[in-house]
Image (tube, grey):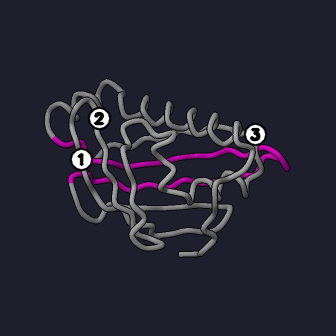
Amino acid sequence: MSKVEESIEVSVPVTVAYNQWTQFTEFPRFMGGVERIEQRTPTLTHWVTKVDGVSREFDAKVVEQIPDERVAWTTVDGDVHQAGVVTFHRLDDSRTKVMLQMEHTPEGAVETAGEKLGLVKHQITQDLKRFKTYIESRGTETGAWRGQV
C-alpha cells in the first residue's frame, strides 16, 4: 500500500471549500482522469475513471464526515483499492488549507512503476491546484451536503 499526502491553500472561507468538496459529481471539473461520478446515496458514489487509456470503475463510501472539518472515504467495490481523508483548516475568514491524505494499492506492473516515479502524488498535486482554480474562480460553492457521518 502506498501513501500520499498533499495540501493547498485556497482563498475562500472554510465552509465554501468544504461545501464544494461534498459535491462529488463536480469532481470531473477539476480531477484529471475522472470521467464521471454518480451519487448513489448520501454516502455512496460510483466512479468512472480513465488514466493513460486504462478505464476503471469503483464504488466509494464516505465513512466519516464532519461539516467544515473532514471527509473520509474508502473504496468498497470495483477495480480500485484506496482510502483517504480530506481535512479543512481555517487559516482566517477568507483562506483555508485543504489537506488530502490517501492510501492506495497499485494494481499491476504499470501502476507500480508509476507509483515509484511519483505519478500518483503528481496527479493529486495537480488535482488540488485545479480545485483551487475552480473554487476561487467561482467564489462560491455549487452546492453543499452538510450531513454528518
Side of 92 relative to 10 (left or right): right
- Kindly identify the amino acid type of the residue bearing the numbered disc 2: Val
Q: Are marks 3 and 1 in contact (CB under 8 Å)?
A: no
Q: Are marks 2 and 1 in contact (CB under 8 Å)?
A: yes
| Amino acid of disc 1 | Arg
Q: Residues within 10 Å of mark 3 (few under 14, many from 20)?
A: many
Q: Secondary structure at mark 3?
A: loop
Residue at 48%, 73% (x, y): give it: 42
Q: Badge 2 is on which residue? A: 51
Q: Position of residue 113 (x, y in %)?
A: 22, 28
Instruction: Give the magenta range.
Output: 79-107
The residue that mark 3 highlights is 11
Structural distance between the alpha carbons of marks 3 and 1: 33 Å
- Indicate yes or no whether the magenta region holds residue 89: yes
- Horizontal and vertical percent for residue 60? 36, 62
**Residue 125 lies within the magenta run:** no
Query: Dot 1 corresponds to which residue?
Result: 56
> What amino acid does circle 3 point to?
Ser
Q: Is residue 27 left or right of residue 92?
A: left
How much space separates mark 2 and mark 1, taking CA atoms?
Answer: 8 Å
Q: Earlier in the sequence, mark 3 or mark 1?
A: 3
